[in-house]
Amino acid sequence: MKSSSLYTFVPLILLLVVMYMLMIRPQRKREKQVNAMRKSVQVGDEIITIGGICAKVVKTKEESLVIQVGADKTKFEVMRWAVSKVVDGGTAPAATKQRERREPVEEEPEEEEPKKTLPKRIKKPAPKVDETGESAAEKAAKEVEE
C-alpha cells in the first residue's frame, strides 16, 4: 500500500522539480541581475525608464533618482525600480563588455547625392474652339442666359 501511493506522487514531484529548474530559477537569476543594474546606476549615466523616457541621471538617492530630460533640461524624480536599462555609463557590466567588443568602423567616402528633380507639371488642355471663335464653355454660358 505504501509503495503504490509513493509511485503516484513521484511524477508530481518530478514535474515540480522540472518546473523549478526551467522556470523559477532563471527568473530569479534575471531579477538579481536587474536589481544589481538598478543599484549600480550612478550620476551621469543615461537610462531608459519602463515608460520609455530617455534621460540622464543627475542625482541618486537610496530609493529614487533625479533625472534630466529634454532640451530644456527638465528635472524630475523617479523610483529606481522604474529604470528599464542603462544606455550609457561605465557601471553596467553588459555595457562595458559591449563597448569592448565593438570594432572601429571604417568610413566609406560619401557619394554625392543626385539633385532632386521635381515632377513635371501637366498642362491643362486648351479649350476647344469652333469656327466662330467661341469655346464650348462660352456657348453653354450664352445658352443659359437666353
Image (spheres, rainbow, N blue to C red):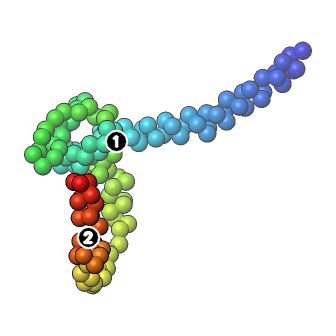
Residue drawn at point x = 31 percent, y = 42 percent: 52
Number of the front mark, 1 or 2: 2
Tag 2, which secondary structure? loop
Classify residue 100 by image quadrant: bottom left
Classify residue 5 by image quadrant: top right
Q: Residues within 10 Å of mark 2 (few under 14, many from 20)?
A: some
Q: Is residue 34 left or right of residue 24?
A: left
Q: Is residue 118 visible?
A: no
**Residue bearing mark 2:** 135
Residue drawn at point x = 15 percent, y = 43 percent: 68
Residue 144, horizontal then vertical, whole percent: 26, 54
Q: 38 or 118, which is in the foreground?
A: 118
Amino acid type of the residue tagged 2 in the rendering:
Ser
Tag 1, which secondary structure? strand
Q: Is residue 1 visible?
A: yes
Residue 23, horizontal then vertical, whole percent: 58, 37
Classify residue 90 by image quadrant: bottom left
Q: 144 or 125, which is in the foreground?
A: 144
Q: Residue furthest right?
A: 1
